[in-house]
Image: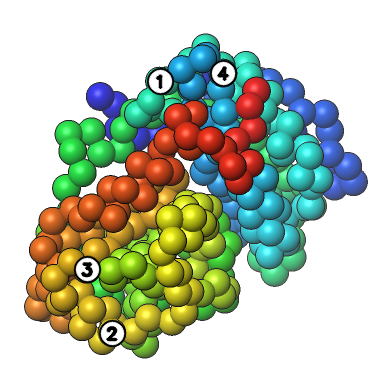
Amino acid sequence: MAAFGSVFMPEMAMAQFDGNAWGPAAIVPANSISLHPGAHVLHYASTCFEGLKAFRHEDGTIAIFRMDKNVARMLQSSELLSLPKFEPALLSQMIVDAVRHFAADVPTPPGSMYIRPTHIGTEPAIGKAATPTLTSMLYVLLSPVGDYFAGGSRALRLLLEDNARCAPHMGMIKSGGNYASALQPTMQAKAKHQADQVLFCPHGDVQETGAANFLLIDGNEIITKALDASFLHGVTRDSILTLARDLGMTVSERDLTVDELLERAAKPGTEAALSGTAAVLAPVGTLIHRGTEYKVGSGEPGPTTARLRQALNDIQWGKAEDKHGWLTKI
Ligand code: PMP
C-alpha cells in the first residue's frame, strides 16, 4: 500500500486573495497552480496547513470530523503568521465542496479521506523579509488513506529530547517551518536510538512529538500539558479528553516534568499514548532519556489506550451516537 499521504485526488478546491478581496472558490486540477520562484512562501515560509478526515458510514453518508475546530485553528495560524484573513465559512465551504466532489472515493473504515487545507503567501517579493505577503492562495487537497497502523498497533519508542521543537511562542501555529525544525532531531533519534519519534521536553517540560500530542494514563487519570502557546492544540487531544471525561476518568491538564513522567511510567499499569489525526491514539511502550530506556508500564499497548481509541473511532465511523456534535454530514 502507498505511504500515508502520498496519493492525491486529481482536483482540489482553491481560492485566491488578490490583496483586497478573496476571489470565488473553485474546483481546479490539483497540479494546476503556478508560483513565481520569488513567492513569499518559498523564501519566508508564510504557510500554514491543517489535517482532518472524512469518514464513510455504513449507510453511505460521508461525515467530516470536527471541521469547525480545524478551520478555527487554520484561521488562528494564518493570523499569527500575518497571512491574509478569511471568513471561516469560506474554508468550511471549500472543504465540503472538495469532499463532496470526491465523495465516491472516500474509503471505508479503517480508511478515510485525509483533508489537507493549505494557505500560502504568493506575492513575488523577496524584499519582504520582514513584511507580510499581500496576496495568498488557499487550497484543499484530498488524500485517501488506509489504517495508519495496518498490521497491528505496536507500542512506540520515544526519545526524550532536551531541545524545543520550535520557538516557544510558535508551537500552537501549524506552520511548515515548525515541521522542518523537527526533522533533524527526529532523524537522529531514529538512527541512533531506533526511536519512532522525539518527545520534545525543553527544560524538563513534556510537550509533544513532531506530529502528535502526548498523554500519560495513570489508572483513572489522564495527564497532559495544559494549553499554552508552546505546542499544537490537537483536535484529537481535545476529543480524547472529552471521551475520557464521559467515561468517568479524571483529566488533569497541567505541566508534566520528565522526572514525574519517568516516575509514573515505572508503575505497572501506567500507559502513555500519542494523539493525532493520523495516529488517532497510538500506544507508547518505551521512553529513552539520556541513554537509558524506561518501559511505560508493561511496555506493551494498554487497555485504556485501546478503549479510548475505539470510542473515538466509533463516533468517527458512525457506530456510536455523535453526542458532542462533532460530525458534519455531507
Ligand atoms: N502536534 C503536532 C506537532 C502535530 O503535527 C499534530 C498533528 N496535526 C498534533 C499535535 C495533533 O493534532 P490533531 O489531533 O489536531 O491532528
* Residue 2 place in picture, x, y as percent: 29, 26
Other-residue count near label 1 (Cα within 10 Å), few / some / many at <14 / 14–19 / ≥20: some
Q: Quadrant of residue 190?
A: bottom left
Residue placed under numbered mark 4 in the picture: 61
Query: Are circles 4 and 1 on residues that touch, CB within 8 Å?
Result: no
- Residue at the spot x=34%, y=57% of the render? 274
Other-residue count near label 4 (Cα within 10 Å), few / some / many at <14 / 14–19 / ≥20: few
Quadrant the N terminus occupies:
top left
Quadrant the C terminus occupies:
top right
Q: Earlier in the sequence, mark 3 or mark 1?
A: 1
- Residue 218 vs 24, above or below: the answer is below
Q: Secondary structure at mark 4?
A: loop
Q: Is mark 1 within 8 Å of ligand 1?
A: no
Residue placed under numbered mark 2 in the picture: 260
Q: Is residue 71 left or right of residue 154?
A: right
Q: Amino acid at mark 4?
A: Thr
Marks 3 and 1, how far apart at CA: 33 Å
- Residue 123 vs 53, above or below: the answer is below
Marks 4 and 1, how far apart at CA: 11 Å
Residue that protrudes farthest toward the front in the picture: 248
Q: Is residue 94 left or right of residue 48?
A: right
Q: Amino acid at mark 3?
A: Thr
Q: Secondary structure at mark 3?
A: loop
Q: Amino acid at mark 1?
A: Thr
Residue placed under numbered mark 1 in the picture: 108
Labels 2, 3: front one: 3
Q: Amino acid at mark 2?
A: Glu
Q: Secondary structure at mark 2?
A: helix
Q: Earlier in the sequence, mark 3 or mark 4?
A: 4
Residue closest to the eye, 52 or 35: 52
